[in-house]
Image (tube, rainbow, N blue to C red):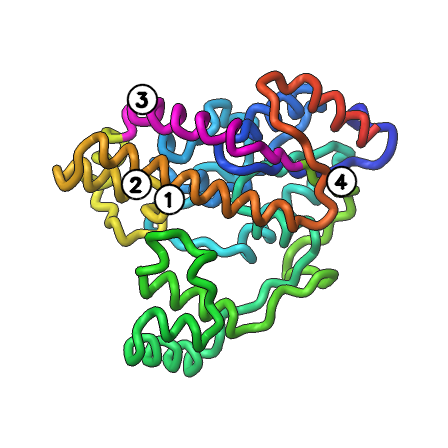
Amino acid sequence: MTESATQPTAIAVLGPTASGKTALAEALAARLGCRIVNADVFQMYRGLDIGTAKPKRRELYDLLDILEPVETFTAGRFVHLAAERCAAAYEQGRHVIVCGGTGLYVRALFEGYSLTPPPPSDERRRLRERLHQVGIERFAQESGVDLASLSQSDRSNPVRVLRAAERLAVEKPRAGTPTPNAPRWHARRLKFGLLPTREWLLPRIRRRTEEMLALGWEEEVRRLLDAGVSEDSPAFRAIGYREVAALIRGEVSQEEATGRIKTQTWQYAKRQLTWLRREPNLIELTPVEDTTTHVEAICGYIS
């Protein structure tokens, strides 16, 4: 048993990209002697290391590097795999930390959402045909898709708009119903979220983007392309990878690619913050450079 005086606890450490959640999760794991379940979908792909800010201390984590770049992944599969690890930790009398920026995954796992399947094939075909007939803007209006909620690049991407419409065409997740076939786990569940201000987060995003490029992000993308990974693969939906590929082909300058990545990352962070502000039962934390204060606070909650 870890230092908890009560039952083992599952602790979610959430926050927008570049907010410091990885450092906090690792410091907390060291204090509690427990493992971290990765909840960032793009960090699950092998070969995507620099551009996804994959943790260097991989021995602390589960669900890192479990996918090939061409594989698709779903929230339902994540819940099944993560619930297995949470259940095992509970049976061992240990805490577990879940950390990552894919908000739907954590919410589905912690709130017990029943994840809905895709719409029937005839409905998907109808939506595709309608999109082709009327174009993106009218299709979005008819299907209820809020284009403003999508990233700037996704708003003009018919595939992304179609997927948003498909999600709206099926029943929304319901709280309180376990995901089918996912192991049951009984640990107490606490969610902590780092909610930075724009003034605090934006310089970190800009600095981290420049550091990633300096660390060899271009070489990483070149290796993926040389290995035959298509830019249409699921892994290349990760922010920045298509921009770096365009840089490699000479279609954009270093300055242009860097600027686009910074902008896309900030837009993504804003969407993450919007999601987190609506997160059920979230305990909010103000990001700080030194994680000690937050580690002590979290330990106080679980003792």
Left or right, 141 with reference to 194: left
Crowd around label 4: few <14 · some 14–19 · many ≥20 (10 Å): few
User: What is the C-alpha distance between the residues marked 4 and 3?
Assistant: 41 Å
Q: Considering the numbered disc 2 on the image, is that residue within a helix, a strand or a loop?
A: helix
Callout 2, which amino acid? Tyr
- On the image, the x and y values in percent for residue 97 come to 65, 34
Quick one: label 2 or label 4, which is nearer the N terminus? 4
Q: Considering the numbered disc 1 on the image, is that residue within a helix, a strand or a loop?
A: loop
Write the residue at 61% across / 22% down: 288
In which quadrant is the N terminus drawn? top right
Q: Nearer the viewer, mark 4 or mark 3?
A: 3
User: What is the C-alpha distance between the residues marked 2 and 4?
Assistant: 40 Å
Q: Considering the numbered disc 4 on the image, is that residue within a helix, a strand or a loop?
A: helix
In which quadrant is the C terminus drawn? top right
Callout 4, which amino acid? Glu
Q: Nearer the viewer, mark 2 or mark 4?
A: 2
Q: Residue furthest front?
A: 199
Q: Which residues are magenta?
A: 193-217
Specify whether residue 89 is in view: no
Q: Which residue is mark 3?
A: 215
Q: Nearer the viewer, mark 1 or mark 4?
A: 1
Specify whether residue 298 is in view: yes
Write the residue at 68% across / 65% down: 174
Q: Which residue is mark 4?
A: 91
Callout 3, which amino acid? Leu
The prevailing secondary structure element of the residues shown in magenta is helix
Crowd around label 2: few <14 · some 14–19 · many ≥20 (10 Å): many
* Relative height, residue 201 to residue 263 (above, below): above
Crowd around label 1: few <14 · some 14–19 · many ≥20 (10 Å): some
Disc number placed over residue 238 in the picture, else none = 1
Callout 1, which amino acid? Ala
Query: Per the image, is 87 magenta?
Result: no
